[in-house]
Amino acid sequence: MKRFPIHFGLVLILVAGRAVAGDKPPEPAYFSWQVKDFAIDRPLGGRVGVAERGMAVASDGHRGNCLACHLLPISRDEVFGDLGPPLAGIASRQSVGAIRLHVVDQSYFNPETVMPGFYRRPEKLHRVAKAYRGRPFLSAQQIEDVVAWLATLK
């Protein structure tokens, strides 16, 4: 009868424990999306956005950084840019699907835009920093969080 080393048995226990615990597989780097009538009607990857997290992403200079170009209705002392339109009341002017498309890839509305496409197909991006190659700038969850927050701005 062969004996297995104890470390082999421990590895089996850990693997089985992780499988039972239901660890989720990592999120894919990119989910496909479709535009119809200048809108992306379905949430990216079926994700559900959380408005509070969306406000955090939008105001974070290392993630959404919407403050660089847009006046936003946030109750903090922030420096706002005015290159883009003010976003107060955006949800009363645009559908959620249109808001999603604006955040994902503004070039559908204006091919000459300077606004970055936060969820463009990775192979369409050029001169991308190593840390961001092969993936969009924001994750599907972050996009849906920002969309959820913008949808509250009526």
Image (tube, rainbow, N blue to C red):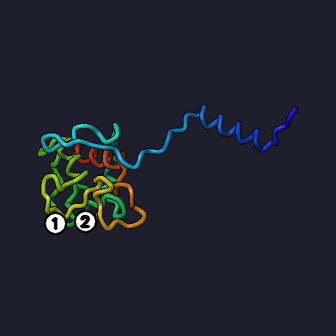
Locate the C terminus and report the quarter of the image it occupies. top left
Q: Is residue 16 left or right of residue 125?
A: right
Question: Three-letter amino acid code at disc 1?
Answer: Leu
Mark closer to the chain start, 1 or 2: 2
Task: Name the image quarter holding residue 56.
Answer: bottom left
Q: What residue sits right under mark 1 in the picture?
A: 83
**Residue at image x 30%, y 52%?**
121
Q: Is residue 15 left or right of residue 72?
A: right
Residue 51 placement (x, y as % from top left) = 31, 45
Residue 141 placement (x, y as % from top left) = 36, 46
**Callout 1: few (<14), some (14-19), or many (20+) C-alpha neighbours within 10 Å?**
few
Residue 14 placement (x, y as % from top left) = 68, 39
Q: CA distance from mark 1 to mark 2?
A: 8 Å
State the mark number for residue 68: 2
Residue that extends furthest to the front in the rendered view of this protein: 1
SS of the residue under disc 1: loop
Locate the N terminus and report the quarter of the image it occupies. top right
Residue that extends furthest to the right in the rendered view of this protein: 1
Residue 39 placement (x, y as % from top left) = 17, 43
